[in-house]
Amino acid sequence: MHDELLRAMQQSVIDGAPTTAAQLAHEAIAKQLDLLHVITHGYASGISFAGEQYGCGAMFLPDLLACAEAMKAAMSVLEPELRKQGTHRETLGRVVLGTAKGDIHDIGKNLVATILAANGFEVFDIGTSASPEAFIHKVREVDAQIIGVSALLTTTMAGQKSVIEALDREGLRPKVKAIVGGAAVTRKWAEEIHADGYARNAMDALELVRSLVARAATA
């Protein structure tokens, strides 16, 4: 499906070209393409490649930040359209998302928020460097069924564990399910901290949340 356009989207992120990324996003909307497909196989593919390059030392931090800006430019165009599509669906559940305390990265979290909202979930994003107390407060405020805690850095992964411990301490589990993700996170880590699930990327997060909500409904 429009492979050339998807490759151009991927390259716009790798090149750190926000103007191009936004123009391509407008083109996708004008052509009435599947925007989730566009995000996953175009822009998200580009940011994943950039992350891998950064991890192996082939790309430096300023380059990665430029890639992030291009991704944000595309999402600023696509997100309103996705949310508009989401408003035509029945709310499937409430999800609280945030990045672990000490971590200010939000690209992955924002992508998950957008995709969940576009697929019928009510999303409450509490931002970056979110404390366990902030998660607890928001979960209680909106009566959420799921929380998602992201961490890009190995040094902030402990914040995910702290959130899950706080949920247990407050007696909110097993009613509230906790999922984790982020560049530094592995399935093994998720199991170690007793998370209810691990998502490798935004589309995995969507399937995981759907599964957990469906399971809760039949319990």
Image (cartoon, rainbow, N blue to C red):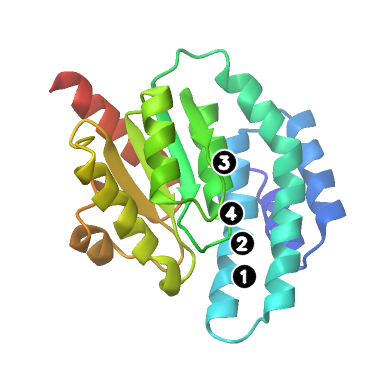
Question: Residue 37, which numbered label?
Answer: 3
Q: CA distance from mark 1 to mark 2?
A: 5 Å
Q: Disc 3 and disc 2: Cα gap in Å?
A: 15 Å
Element under disc 2: helix
Which amino acid does the dot numbered 4 rest on? Asp
User: Quadrant location of residue 184?
Assistant: bottom left
Mark 2 is surrounded, within 10 Å at the Cα level, by few (under 14), some (14 to 19) or many (20 or more) other residues, namely many
Q: CA distance from mark 2 to mark 4?
A: 13 Å
Residue type at numbered disc 1: Ala
Q: Position of residue 38 (x, y in %)?
A: 63, 43
Decide which of 194, 102 is in the foreground and name it: 102
- In the image, farthest residue toward the bottom: 57
Q: Nearer the viewer, residue 11 or 112?
A: 112
How far apart are the alpha carbons under marks 1 and 4?
Answer: 15 Å
Q: Secondary structure at mark 4?
A: loop
Q: Give whichever of discs 3 and 2 has the lower sequence position.
A: 3
Residue under the image location 81 percent in, 46 percent down: 22
Mark positioned earlier in the residue sequence (1 or 4): 1
Residue with the mark numbered 1: 50
Q: CA distance from mark 3 to mark 4?
A: 21 Å
- Picture quarter containing residue 173? top left
Report x, y in % for residue 19: 87, 53
Q: Which element type, helix, strand or loop, lies under badge 1?
A: helix
Identify which residue is drawn at 77% across, 49% down: 73
